[in-house]
Every structure is written in C-alpha cells, then in structure tokens.
Amino acid sequence: MAKIPDSPEQIFDDFSQDVRRAFGAEVVSLALFGSGARGEYIPKKSDINFLVVLTQKGIADLKGGLELVHKWRKFNVSTPLFLTRQYIETALDTFPIEFLDMKTYHQQVYGEDILAGLQIKGEHLRHQIERELRGKLIYLRSGFLTAGNDRGNLLEMLSASVPAISSIFEGLLHLKSLPPAGSRKEAFEAAARAFKLNGDVFRNVMNIKRGEWRGSKVQVQDIATAYIAEMAKLVMIVDTM
C-alpha cells in the first residue's frame, strides 16, 4: 500500500525523476503549487499539485504521462497540470487569478522557474475578479436556497466556497499593492480589512472550513446570509475600481 507523504518535499526527487523518465528532454519546468506550496498541506487530506511545463513536442504526445499519473495518484498527487510556455504566456489575460496564485505560491522542483517571471496586468486581474465574484455570489445565493434547510449541506457549501474565494481575495490584495496573505485564513482577514468588510463573518466561514465551528442550523443560516451580504457589497466595490 502506498505511503502518503508527510510533506510534498518527500516525493520531489522521485516524482521529478519519473517526470523526466516519461518526457525526457521535453521537460522545461516542474513546480509544486496549491496547498502544499502555501504551507497548508495536510497528509491524507490534501492533494499534491504539480505544474509540468513541456515543449510543444512534449505536449503533443502525452501517452508517456499515463503510467506517471496512475502511479502517483496513490500518493495523493493530483493529475499534474501539463502546459507549455506559450500557453502560459498567452493565457495570462484569461486566467490572471490562477497564474498570480501559482506565481506567488510555488516551489520550484526542476528546471526553469517560469512562474517567477510572469507579469500579471492589473486590468486583466480586476476584470476576472469581478466576473468570478459575481459568479460566486450567484453560487452562494442558489446554494443557500437549495441547501439552507439542511445544516450539513449548508456547512459543506460554505466550506467549499473558501478555496476559490481566497484566491480571488489574493488577487484583490495584489490590485491594492498589498503583500500576499500567506494563507487562506490571512487572505480572508486581509481582504476584510482592506475593503472594510465584516471580518467576523469571514472568520466564521474560515472556522467552518477548518472544522472549528459548531452551531445550530439557524446560526449557520445567519452566517450564510451575512456572508452573501458581504460578498454582494464587495462586488459593488470591485465594479467601481
């Protein structure tokens, strides 16, 4: 039975060797991103996320990655994100939040550190942030109406919203020229301060995500209602930026 690593660093050498064995000279870069790179990795719960940058020749033939993905899934390694340098450079205007997150929080494992040199334009970032916030607001309202009478489902919905919204908040901090938060909890708190939102609401949602909140169905309904109200307020703020 595969042993789940206590930290992502434990598998860097072996995983890197397997990637290079599968794709040879077509491997340009290998980097860890996600919770492992943020210092929020939890053994047996967190997935381990890698970005593999290949040449155009390498990305055209992914068969070499089939055995790689199958083998490392047993160690909680998600299917790596396989991209090319050209794809990254031409997608910065489309996915600025995602690439900003990877640029800010990554560990270089092998090859060229492509993420470190990425230039994210403010106008692209603001546009995606507004679009994502509006989408998350619809998701939260619909989820509340669907799951609001079931305490467990409502808690799950609120918890599931945290990763994506924390990445949006990191983007907002970048737009205001504020330093990276460092963790999802700090991202929620920093964004609340920067945009004069109700910090208690976001702390409650983070505690739900961390499994540290206990309360009745009515109490979680109140948290969800307040969370939706603060997100609606933030949408209007971003719209005027």
Image (cartoon, rainbow, N blue to C red):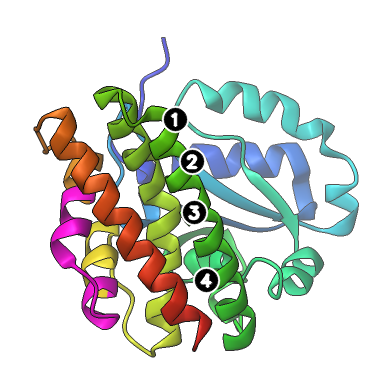
Residue at (28% x, 49% y) in the render: 225
Category of crowding for the residue at label 2, using alpha-carbon neighbours closer than 10 angstroms: few (below 14), some (14–19), many (at least 20): few
Q: Which mark is residue 100?
A: 4
Secondary structure beneath label 4 = helix
Which amino acid type is marked by label 3?
Answer: Lys
Secondary element at tag 1: helix
Q: Amino acid at mark 4?
A: Leu
Residue 32 in view, yes or no: no
Check disc 1: other Cα within 10 Å, few if <14, some if 14-19, many if 20+: few
| Residue 68 position within the rendered picture, expressed as x and y whole percent measured from the top left | 65, 29
Which residue type does callout 2 highlight? Ser
Magenta region, mostly helix, strand or loop? helix
Q: Residues within 10 Å of mark 4 (few under 14, many from 20)?
A: many
Disc nearest the viewer among 4 and 3 = 3
Between the residue at mark 4 and the residue at mark 3, the CA separation in whole angstroms equals: 19 Å
For the residues bearing labels 2 and 1, Cβ distance under 8 angstroms: yes
| Residue bounds of the magenta highlight | 191-205
User: Which comes sooner in the sequence, label 4 or label 1?
Assistant: 4
Residue 136's tag is 3
